[in-house]
Image (tube, grey):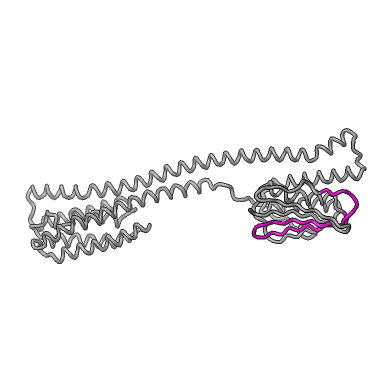
Amino acid sequence: MAGTAARPAVRQRAPEHAGPEVAATAAHAVADASDRGARIVAVVIALAWHLAIGLPALLGSWSRLAAPPVVAAGWLVTAAVGVGTGVRLLRGGLPPARPLAAALLVVDATVFAAAGERQLFTAANWVWGGLAWFFLLVLWRRPLGWLLALLAAHATIALAAVALHGATAPADLSRYAMYVYGTSSLPVAVFAGASAIATLARDRAGTAAAALGVAAEREAAERARRERQARLALVSGAAEEVLAALAAGDADPGDPAVRHRAVLAAARLRRLIAESDDVPDPLLHELRAAADLAERNGLPIELVAVGVPPELPVEVRRRLVDPPTAALAGARGWARLTVVVGPDEVVVSLVTPDHEGPDATGPPGGDGDGPVEHLHERDGEIRWTQTRWRRT
């Protein structure tokens, strides 16, 4: 028998929710959104400080600097690092931390040497207040220890400049300590705060997504229970009438009409049972169940499938399968069952030889996920039953 000899391997379909995967994805999305906001703030602070404070101070003290072109070159190099790093951060990437950090330290030492003794503690020596923000940018999302190490290197360079320029009086050393603390504490706070906020947002989003996953699992379990109860009621009702008539003696088991009713009830029972199986192609699986039962009753049947049916709701599958299943129960001689799948429709057709007796094609089709049409014709030679679902 074509189409019914080989059965598809049963496999688990993907669950309706991905549980931990969804929670992790949602948590990362929230953390990324929070991190992007912090990146924008850090880039704006660094570049605004460099332009609005560092550049005017540099230009205003040009004649008093020991080597103005060198200080200006350091400012330009730092600006280029900041722009390139800012673009990378705002696009979601991370800059190469080590080479950029080394370049900034070289600028740091060069500007301290080129500023001169008279401008050592003035705004013209712009590396005091502005360079730490660029450390923050190039080390974004790196461990906090990296930033602390870079700031320690910056403080060491500054201390060496203070010593080389002979500014070793208690007042100068106190000023040095205040500069180091004042220019480092805020970048460290922003760096650590941004990391903490992103982590907190990720954790809270993960907790919320996990709670939603539990609720979804509960709803899925409840829906499965309702579907099992509804299927049990259908299975019970499919054979109840025939069994009750036989038990009461109102039906003769030898009567062809009674046997036909019994075969029809058995076919519907088989289809309803197959309906709960977890298989790749539920529609074909239910049709194969009906075809198998007909073949066991001695009816040669050919099942041909063209295309792969889409996922259809249970009610749509019932309306597609019920009429040909009922027609198979009364078929004589042979049967040809065909399933043709198009981009937006599924057509199930059954052709059998015509014979005397009433039609038994099941309930008419109705609306499910789109209309289900039901046609039945007979011309004295063949009987033709067709159900058609169209996507709306």
Q: Is residue 333 magenta?
A: yes
Q: Residue at x 45, y 41 (%)?
A: 207
Horizontal and vertical percent for residue 377?
Answer: 82, 55
Q: Residue at x 76, y 55 (%)?
A: 386
- In the drawing, does residue 311 fall left or right of residue 3? left
Specify the quadrant of the image occupied by residue 245: top right
Query: Which of 383/175 is in front?
Result: 383
Number of residue marks: 0
Query: Which of 193/53 is in front?
Result: 53
Horizontal and vertical percent for residue 134?
Answer: 26, 56
Q: Residue at x 79, y 50 (%)?
A: 325
- In the drawing, does residue 353 fall left or right of residue 110? right
* Vertical order, 17 against 153 (above or below): above
Query: Which of 188/220 is in front?
Result: 220
- In the drawing, does residue 61 fall left or right of residue 333? left
Specify the quadrant of the image occupied by residue 249: top right
- Of all residues shown, which one is farthest toward the top? 248
Q: Is residue 58 magenta?
A: no
- In the drawing, does residue 21 fall left or right of residue 14? left
Horizontal and vertical percent for residue 275?
Answer: 71, 47
Horizontal and vertical percent for residue 15?
Answer: 59, 48
Which range is magenta?
332-360
Specify the quadrant of the image occupied by residue 224: top right
Q: Residue at x 29, y 57 (%)?
A: 138
The quarter of the picture where the N terminus appears is bottom right
